[in-house]
Amino acid sequence: MGNASITMKLPQGFRDEFGLEAEQKQALSESIVHCLQQRGYKRINTPLVEYEEVFDDYEMKNQQSMYRFLNSDNRMLVLRPDLTLPIARFLATNNVSVPQRFYYLGELLASTPEHVGQVNQVTQAGIELVGYASTRAEMECLWLINQFNQSLFDNLLYIELGDATFADVLLQSVVSDEKERKAVKAALFAKNIPVYKRLIERYKNSEFYGFLDNWPFLFGPAEEIRAILRQVTLPIEAMRIARDVLQLAKQVSALPGQAVRIDLSSEPPQSYYTGITFRAYLNGVSSYVISGGRYDKLLNNFQSEPEKAVGMGIDIDVLAQAMDRRSPVVPRTLVFYADEQWPEAAKLLAENPTYSLAIADDLCTARRCAKRQNAAMSFCPLKSNSPSFCSCMFQKA
């Protein structure tokens, strides 16, 4: 091979975290975990590796796939792409009574094609409320989002509410053919308006056509959605669902500084949701940063007895990057000292949390380091016979 150098690069979709970015991510994680601990949530850690069947009913996002590999027994293992399903597996295989309130913080991994440009490893925090049938569980999640909104994001987060069953309930009352229902729903969720309009054309004589015609645009402030729904006819069960979402929006809007919208035309964040869904968006960020909802049937995959449950996931990476853009730079000061002045330097460090040691052999080098770091300098008076002083004077000459 000779002296040829080898450039070691990370695999596609992975990246290192360093400096302010890593610190901001850690600070955000700690703030969220502290809030959840104060609220009485119990920490749960599940393995990064699970058997593939844990995720049998999990539908990956577009163009994503799981990392798979065989163990020594030729059973297929995967790196977890989701954290809710491992918790469901935990509940089904351990003697844990419900109701329970869990919180987690961990890594998710899913492979995306190179041209998509998405990351393949994501840090996610979240909660799971298992054994709670009341909508108070949804309000607990939404209240927590509001707490994060106030304490971390200056009320720039807005919440979007929906229902995972709304589209299916409505289409079952209008479209008899299952294949056609799937086609209409796919066009609606993709916002492929020309295809959607062509598909609903045959239902022009239906009493529900007025709603179908407006459906792709049924998102926005609650009052606008309410006004549209007053002008159209809906199947009874679909109207009940819409009213429940509107009622929840009214409760959320009463939270301090909380903006809320409704979207009855988009795909649920996860395929296993069975009721109310919610997303939180941050101004200036294209994708949602928090998502969650009710999943009353998920535990059926692992045990015979179903359990009512609500959960939400928080995208730590995206939120930390957004905070990094908004956070003021904390002024830093480097402390330089001669060996005999360590007690004075230690006192400065103890009294000033933003002070750190200038780890340099002489004062001139310390000053250059401070300039590179955009930091101020603080140092104890040096005696003329100090080695550090002499070194600095020699370099200046």
Image (cartoon, rainbow, N blue to C red):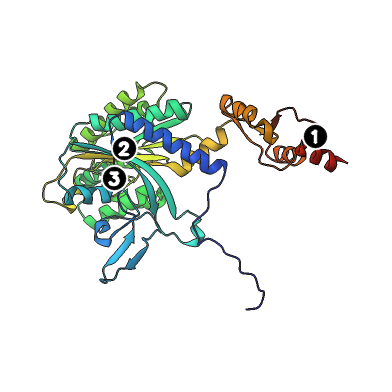
Q: Examine the rendering and report whether any part of residue 192 can be seen.
A: yes
Residue at 17 percent across and 49 percent down: it is 94
Which disc is residue 248 wearing?
A: none
Pointers 2 and 1 in contact (CB under 8 A)? no
Q: Label 3 to label 1, Cα distance in Å? A: 96 Å
Return the residue at label 2: 162
Q: In the image shown, does 355 or 88 lie closer to the viewer?
A: 355
Q: Tag 1 or tag 3, which sits nearer the N-term?
A: 3
In front: mark 3 or mark 1?
1
Label 2 packing within 10 angstroms: few (<14), some (14-19), many (20+): many
x, y percentage for residue 187? 36, 51
x, y percentage for residue 265? 34, 42
- Give the residue type at disc 2: Gly
Q: Quadrant of residue 178?
A: bottom left
- Give the residue type at disc 3: Lys
Label 1 packing within 10 angstroms: few (<14), some (14-19), many (20+): few
Return the residue at label 1: 385
Tag 3's secondary structure? loop
Q: Tag 1 or tag 2, which sits nearer the N-term?
A: 2
Q: Label 2 to label 3, Cα distance in Å? A: 26 Å
Q: Examine the rendering and report whether any part of residue 199 can be seen.
A: no
Return the residue at label 3: 204
x, y percentage for residue 307? 16, 42
- Give the residue type at disc 1: Asn
